[in-house]
Image (cartoon, rainbow, N blue to C red):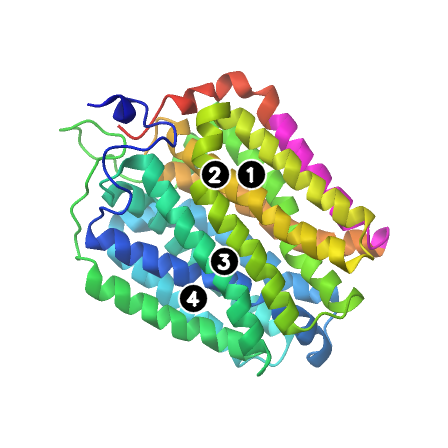
Amino acid sequence: MSVAQKSSGTLQPRSTSMFNQPMAVWAIAFASIIAFMGLGLVDPILPMMKDQLHASDSQLTMLFTSYNAVMAVAMLVTGVISSKLGIKNMLLSGIVLIALFSALAGNASSVTEIAWLRAGWGLGNAFFVATALSGLVSLSRAGVAKSIILFEVAVGLGISVGPLLGGELGAISWRAPFYGVACLMVIAFCAIFFMMPRKPAIAKAPTAAAGTPKKKASLLDPFRALKNRSLLIFGLGAMLYNFGFFTLLVYAALVLGHLHHMDVHGLGYVFLGWGLCLAFTSVFTAPTLQKKQGTIKAMCVQLLLFAVTLFAMGYWTTEKAVVVTMVIAAGLFLGNNNTLITTAVMNAAPVERPTASAAYSFLRFIGGALAPYFSVKFAEWFNFHAPFYIGGGFVVLAVIVIWLNKKHLQHVDHAGGH
């Protein structure tokens, strides 16, 4: 084993290329690009939905709150269901649910109806996302670090293209992006169905040694996994920083749309820039930061920089150029942090990676469920600057939680992948 392989807990290059992958990995990566288009595809049409459906900001935030809340809870059962269905069937089931509920949302007549349908969409996304990450890591030839970077490439491409496509389709009708997601998921279904074998050979066993009998999955596994302090700390940190993430994603779109009168095309281009920055740093700068600073220090620095962008938007909320610039700049820091924290979670606890992913994602999406609703409530209770300040405060709190427990987290730079 080479020196680079021995240090695979970091994001250092290994002898196996990130692009030397089996067909099943490329099928998952391609489907992930399309799946993550759905996140940003709807964002540019929020102001349009408010006007045409006569919805309040609070009602619009329920589109994200119901989606993330169901996804958080569903993450707890993904391990058990996946153990019965298998990787391929689990991915296909998630894709079918996303396509079905997004198509139904496009045919809905009220924001409340769409919010309920988004809950079903969140269930499908939980099935897909939890399985896609753990499946890609398990099936890859390139090890944990490079597999996660490949996953973040797919996430970044999906997030960056989604708002642009949403803006263009939204110019036709607010319904068009929902139908667009459904059509794209049909393509993703075909990619998985035809390119991935029914029982793919696992390139590397995630945690168990050769010959060790496979443990039967249980609904209690994610809760047991959270007894591991490192996994719990990363989960709590992600829950707090996701509060800032979804404040940016939802409240900034509402501010740009209504306070600054930006149309769907403009919103699409702003969040395209955000997504491209996220994709670039997640691949090209996160490995360098981790190598030079270590995972924990690099993560905390990037989160603090993200908090600064939120504070700047809070102070200069009425300045359109500042809000636009800070939204795009935030993508740089979020891209770095996404790769750093995902790699850390995969290496944090001595449990199966699907179980670690489910436990971590449960906590993470709780923050995503609370932020959209409360960001608008903070604006109502205080003023329109407050959501950005409070969102930034939650991100700073995430840094404090992680930094105060850093002695329990340092092992992630020396773990995993082998």
- Specify which label sits upstream in the sequence, 4 or 1: 4
Name the amino acid type tagged 3.
Answer: Ile
Residue at the spot 16% in from the left edge and 52% down from the top edge: 199
Q: Which residue is mark 2?
A: 285
Question: Are discs 1 and 2 less than 8 Å apart at CB?
Answer: no
Amino acid carrying mark 4 in the image: Ile
For disc 1, the neighbor class at 10 Å (few under 14, some 14 to 19, many from 20) is: many
Check if residue 400 falls in the magenta segment.
Answer: yes
Residue 159: numbered disc: 3
- Of mark 4 and mark 3, the one earlier in the sequence is 4
Disc number lying in front (1 or 2)? 2
Instruction: Give the mark, 3 or 1, whose residue is nearer the N terminus.
Output: 3
Q: In the rendered structure, which segment of residues is drawn in magenta?
A: 381-401
Asked whether the viewer can see residue 345, the reply is: no
Q: Are marks 4 and 2 in contact (CB under 8 Å)?
A: no
Q: Quadrant of the C terminus?
A: top left
Cβ–Cβ under 8 Å for marks 4 and 3: no
Q: In screen coordinates, is 386 left or right of 117?
A: right
The amino acid type found where label 2 is placed reads Thr
Q: Say if residue 102 shows up in the picture.
A: yes
Residue mark closest to the camera, 4 vs 1 = 1
Write the residue at 72% across / 52% down.
374
Which element carries disc 1, helix, strand or loop? helix
Pointer 1 or 2: first along the chain: 1
Return the x and y of residue 38 as percentages of the image width and height: 49, 64
Q: Which mark is residue 98?
A: 4
Label placed on residue 238: 1
By secondary structure, the bulk of the magenta-drawn segment is best described as helix
Q: Is residue 155 left or right of residue 372?
A: left
Amino acid under label 1?
Answer: Ala
